[in-house]
Image: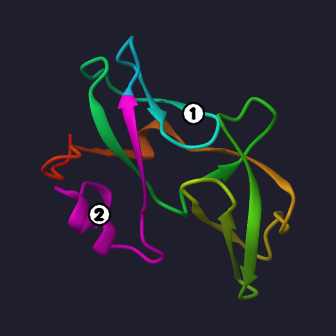
Amino acid sequence: MDLYDRPANRFVAGFIGSPAMNFVPGRISDDGKSVVLEMDGAPRLPLDRSLQAGRPVVAGLRPEHLQTAGEDAPIRTRIRMVESTGSLAYSTTASTPGLMLVEQGRGRLRAGEAAMLTIAPENIHLFDPENGLAL
């Protein structure tokens, strides 16, 4: 569980967990308190710590930590595909890069529909894009 909760590097983060962690390039905002993702709409996710402003990063977002939210959600996208197993629903976004998210049960998301997504700041993993080490 320590490897899952606090992976030391990007390789471990991508290896532990199923489905695998989403990785999105980004940079730390000018105030150092959020990460701006390099994806459609340039969503800004608040962080639970401050980092060097402007620093390039790779954000790691576990599919099970992404949640649907209201109109003020930072990530606005469309759902490309939904696969339901009955107890879980696996959805893939149509954004670039695409994100995978997991919902309990049959899920509320449908292919082609708009999706507003968020993630708790403590569930955002950040990695150095050069050496892959956790920040």
Seen in the image, is 57 located left or right of residue 121?
left
Indicate yes or no whether the magenta region holds residue 76: no
| Image quadrant assignment for residue 100 | bottom right
Measured in 3D between alpha carbons, the distance from the residue under mark 1 to the one under mark 2, in whole angstroms, is 23 Å
* Amino acid at circle 1: Ala
User: Pointer 1: what residue?
Assistant: 42
Q: Residue furthest bottom?
A: 85
Tell me what residue is drawn at x 71 percent, y 88 percent: 85
Q: Mark 2: give few (<14), some (14-19) or many (20+) Cα within 10 Å.
A: many
**Residue nearer the viewer, 98 or 32:** 98
Using residue 18 as the reference point, say whether residue 40 is left or right of it: right
Q: Quadrant of residue 31?
A: top left
Give coordinates of residue 71: x percent, y percent. Answer: 81, 33
Question: Callout 1: 10 Å neighbours few (<14), some, many (20+)?
Answer: some
- For mark 2, what is the residue? 13
- Mark 1 in CB contact with mark 2 (< 8 angstroms): no
In the rendering, at what x and y percent does residue 22 appear?
45, 60
